[in-house]
Amino acid sequence: VQGRGWVLPTRTFVQQNILGGSLVSTAETTASPSNQNHKNGVSGHAGVRGGSAVAVSSSSIREIVFFGRLEVLKGLQVFCSALDILSERESTTLLATVERISFLGHKNLGSVDAESYVEKRAEDGNWNVSIAFLTEKIQPEAIAYVQGEGRLCVMSSLLENSPYTVLEALALRIPFIVSNVGGIPELIDQRDHKDVLFSPKPSNLAAALERVLTQGTKIARPHTPPPLTLKQTLDFHRILAYESAMLRRSGDESDDAPLGGAREIRGYAPLVSVCLVHRNRGTLVLKTVEALLAQDYWPFEIVMVDDGSTDEESLKVLGEIQHFFNATQAVPFRLLRTPNRYPGAARNTAAESARGKFLIFADDDDIPKPNWISTLINVAHRTHADVVTSMADAFTSPTTPYKQQRPDFRWLSIGPAADLGMFHNVFGSSQALVRKKAFFKIGGFSEEGESTYEDWEFFADAVLKGYQLEAVPEALSWYRQRNRRGKQTKKTGTPQDSSARAAIVPDENLMYTTNAYTNRLRALRPYMRAIPEQLRNALLFGWGTAKLVESQKRSSSSRKSKSASGMIAADMAGNNATKEN
């Protein structure tokens, strides 16, 4: 992570994924020298640091199991091509030494049937071995199957993170060989790398299989035994609980203060300016204001900009909101009225009038959660970030979500990943906090009204200019989803009339009334400015190609795509070329 330019906090806890309790118990049992597993023709013991490796004889292996989804990224084609190579070697009859080759995993080859694909590969490659497809098993059933006698698991993924399949195989002492991609080598004791790892190319996998089937192999030992990983996790949380208890005992925290909220920044409470933008959503903005008044942080002010509302009900609501704050002085409040200049300009107007050290942005249909401001301020204070974003929970109800309500979906964010940010807004939701000085140095939001994604553009601009952006891995606000303008009816397929549409869509959402291509180009502008002019067309071409592939994938998931089928058919026809790589 650090090698990719990510800056980690001073206190960083890094460990492997933890396994479920039953698997940890199994690992503890099998790690003991007195519990040696002989049913696969093995001897020795593993699972503890310093333990000897477990040998597996070649004669004990009677079944090869492709363990993973039947798809390209899991190395299905690499596996099939490796079997082709073994079957072509006249001097050996390696595949004849096994009784069966099984494919254990769900099918995922798009419009091509994975079983038909494998059967054709077996026929063309003259494998001459029994084939079984186990594509309907759930995780516990799959784990039970690979523990069976005489089975060797093969995991030939082209891309991986830190897969549980490998952790489970290590914990259960299952014989396997696996590709050396992603975080897989980190999971395995370095002493066993040469015995179980291979580069995911057909020739390399074929060589690994030949070695195992002629010389035997070893059951790999884990880099960190699962019981130790679990203990480290529990110890880490005990330390956090102890520190929290000590802070409460010293009076720095109150027992009833909300976790992650104002109690964590006692003594640091800068003025925050909530920049609230509104246009023709009087009913909805009332709920946003109510949510702001329920925040657990103080002090903050509300700078509300009405971006040229024309709706009589909305204008009436604005007057009521102004009267409420004048009468109650609940929080400092200012209402600024401007002609309609669209969200970017309205947010900039609010920022220019703000008095706080920090700006935090909200739209008139957002529902901030009670710890919204306090959490963002806490992160900014601890990390010195210039921009702090978060995740958001999406909902469609016209009412305010209740505390335990399940969102329609959660908008996940990664943070300052500039490369991914060129294709999707992975920076975070628009309900973000920005240091006021940094906001104006970055240049604020762009102000044209013929497109949207001004928040995405701003985040990309900030990251590419070197400003620090942090993303909170928590949904701190509710984001209201609205139907598209002119929704089609199920019965007639015709646009709904204006009165019906008004009931569904109280306003015209810029996401649906602006050009999608123009919107995406707006988010690309910081990238265009960051590279030499001679390369800008190449950037546009690469971005456009990626979006085309993405569009084709969406089409193939809902119907058979001719182009996708053609690509896969061509790939199947070119298998002979693949074997040589």
Image: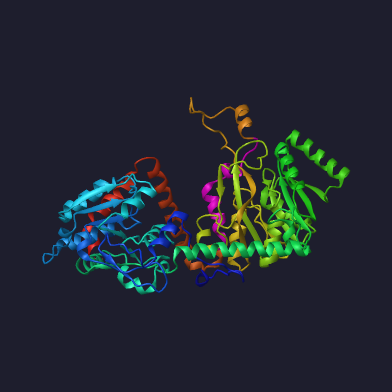
Classify residue 382 by image quadrant.
bottom right
296 to the left or right of 28? right
Q: Quadrant of residue 61?
A: bottom left
Q: Position of residue 94 (x, y in %)?
A: 16, 62
Above or below, 302 against 576 in this view is: above
Q: Residue 572: image x %, image y %?
A: 25, 53
Inspect this view and state whether residue 541 appears.
Answer: no
The residue lying at 58 percent from left, 66 percent from top is 464
Q: Above or below — where is 513 with respect to 163?
A: above
73 sits to left or right of 380: left
The stretch in magenta equals: 506-526
Magenta segment: does it hold 46?
no
Q: How is the image coloured?
A: rainbow
Q: Main secondary structure of the magenta part?
A: helix
Can residue 467 be seen here?
yes
Magenta includes 511?
Answer: yes
